Image (cartoon, helix red, strand yellow):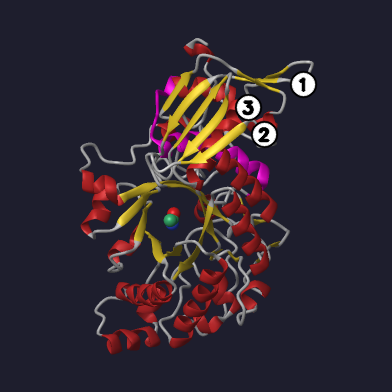
Amino acid sequence: MSDTALPAIVPQPRLLHPSDSALTTSDVATALSEQLTTALAPEAYRLTVTAEGATLAAGSEAGLRNGRATWTQLLDHATTDEDGRTTVPGVVVEDEPRHAWRGLMVDCARYFTPVAELEKLIDALALHRMNRLHLHLTDDQGWRVEIDGWPRLTEVGSTRPRTLAGHHRSAENSGGEPQWTTEPHSGHYTQEELRALVRYGADRGVTLVPEIDLPGHMQAAVAAYPELGNLDQPVRVRETWGISEHVLAPTETAFRFVRDVLTQVVDIFPSEWIHVGGDECPTVEWRSSPVAQEFMAAHGLSTERQIQREFLKVAREVLSAAGRTLVGWDEILEAEPPADAITMLWRRGKDVTDAEQHGLRCVYACSDTLYLDHYQADPEHEPLALGGRSTLEDVYRTQELPAGASQEQRDLLLGVQGQLWREYVPTSEHLEYMLFPRLCALSEVAWGHRTSWEDFRQRLQQHLPRLAARGIGYRQLD
Ligand code: ACM
């Protein structure tokens, strides 16, 4: 087999050679023989296909899964003759991921993402040898997870009667009447559904990382339980986008709420990592609330921002007691994060250097290229999006480490993650349009064996039919 006939594998393996012969078999379903070996790192694998057979060796079950994903892609290049005998291209693959954290975040709060859609996404992640699905389960516009003892979170907090139509900035700027959808939007997961989804992911090597965003992005919870908030009058589940000022109040009720919610979340999700948000928390209500001001005086806090630290402490207590690791957006760097926390670097200009100053491990999730809700081309020809621009090539060229990064910095960077915020992504078709093929490019960044943009684009031409065969929608290449 010449080099040009090599099958396209996405993400690109570290080494992919033709072997001296192809495999022909009458039972391709049982053709792969597997073995674990301590000679390979846990996530590494070696796949050999010759006339003698197909063998997969790996350092752990996770490595075997990685190898099976590559085998699955290889089978797309197999041919079957009229006697039912299948010929699989002969290859030798040696592979190991650069990054341990190879993630995608989906915003299930702005638009509820049904379980079947999440299962399909998990399958797509596994096909690309990605291993984390971060679920953004709560936000101002919807609370999506059932919590015992707090029934109104889902009875009230999971429904918004209407949703802003069009871009929120144009509504803010026009001075005219905003336009609204006429349908309410609603949906939540039962704990049983989430436990089943966790198992579905585990069977495919994808860990589900839940996020309860606190103490900001809490308007839906405050709408359900006004006593969690800072105001005397009730608020509604937020119907517009943007950031709400209705955040948790620093009261014993709100701290108990955080404890209750996180205690149940760790019970549902066995993930080592639990995300507690921490981003974009306005302090304006705390400034004018006598209760918050009393709390500050009682705890010797000099700025409202320090109240956020108190919420982080409560969250950390629950997670530490359960043996879990706290994950937060990079704003936690300003709230004296615990030394064992992981931060997700999302704001433009933040990189591992910022995490290193606090000795924290981090995941690169930067809005520069890894916000997959941003436009993928000229907005004039694209469906409405939040803003920004992140083309397929931009994702492919993501620089997750600064030039000249030290070994310490490399060690602190656990990996990369794409974000799919859903304010402007209401349907599953639109979700797939935004994710594919940019997720394919992200998987190449995560595995770290990028060849060249031109080569990647060529391999994608062979890879896109794989997505189509699995019913996954995608944006056509430009
Ligand atoms: C974020 O985009 N607020 C994490």
The residues bearing labels 3 and 2 have C-alpha atoms spaced at a distance of 13 Å
Q: Quadrant of residue 158?
A: bottom right
**Magenta residues, as a range?**
426-454
Q: The residue under label 3 is which amino acid type? A: Leu
Q: How crowded is the residue under tag 3: few (<14 C-alpha within 10 Å), some, or many (20+)?
A: some
Secondary structure at numbered mark 3: helix
Q: Is residue 377 magenta?
A: no
Instruction: Identify which residue is drawn at 47% across, 79% down.
Output: 259
Residue 75's disc number? 3
Mark 2: which amino acid? Thr
Q: How far from the left and from the top, in percent, is residue 424?
A: 58, 49
Contact between marks 3 and 1 (CB within 8 A): the answer is no
331 or 467, nearer to the observer: 467
Q: Which structural element holds mark 2?
A: helix
Give the labeled residue for mark 2.
30
Q: Where residue 442 sits: x, y (%)?
A: 46, 38
Asked if one can make out residue 233 in the rendered structure from this viewpoint, the answer is no
